Image: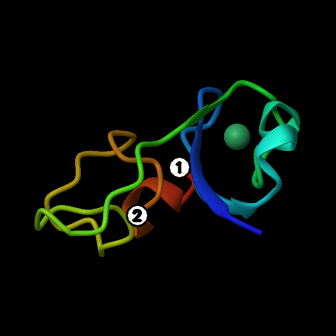
Amino acid sequence: MPSYDFRCDDCGEEFTVFVAISKKDEVQCADCGGDEVRQLVTTFYHSGSSSGESGASCTRSTCGSCTTCRTPG
Ligand SMILES: [Zn+2]
């Protein structure tokens, strides 16, 4: 089963799901459960500022997936 990357419009969460292509419209946010999610373009390389890093260069809420953005408050 293929995997797809999505980003939630509600909370900014980025997540990967394994889902049949016919079920992509049913994907919900892995974090808040919202259904306002967008499929991200799958990339097979890193440009150097990919999500999931420690957030050293991230201003809060820009990426929604790094440690800085995930920390409440
Ligand atoms: Zn969400």
The residue carrying pointer 2 sits among few (fewer than 14), some (14 to 19) or many (20 or more) residues within 10 Å by Cα, namely: many
User: Who's the residue at 68% across and 64% down the image?
Assistant: 2
Q: Is residue 60 visible?
A: yes
Q: Position of residue 18 (x, y in %)?
A: 76, 65
Q: How many marks?
A: 2
Which amino acid lies under the numbered mark 2 shown in the image of this protein?
Answer: Cys
Which amino acid lies under the numbered mark 1 shown in the image of this protein?
Answer: Gly
Asked which quadrant contains residue 17, the reply is bottom right
User: Who's the residue at 77% across and 54% down the image?
Assistant: 30
Q: Is residue 28 visible?
A: no
Q: Position of residue 11 (x, y in %)?
A: 62, 36
Q: Judge whether 13 appears above or below 49 on screen.
A: above
Reading the chain from its start, which is encountered first: label 1 or label 2?
Answer: 2
Looking at this view, is 2 or 33 the one in front?
2
Asked which quadrant contains residue 57, the reply is bottom left
Q: Judge whether 9 appears above or below 39 on screen.
A: above
User: Who's the residue at 43% across and 69% down the image?
Assistant: 67
For disc 2, the marked residue is 66
Question: In the image, 19: left or right of 73?
Answer: right
User: Who's the residue at 65% across and 28% down the image?
Assistant: 10
Q: Position of residue 14 (x, y in %)?
A: 55, 52
As drawn, which residue projects farthest toward the bottom?
Answer: 54
- Indicate the quadrant of ligand 1 in the picture: top right
For disc 1, the marked residue is 73
Question: In the image, 57: left or right of 43?
Answer: left
Q: Judge whether 12 appears above or below 50 on screen.
A: above
Task: State the separation of the CA atoms marked 1 and 2.
Answer: 14 Å
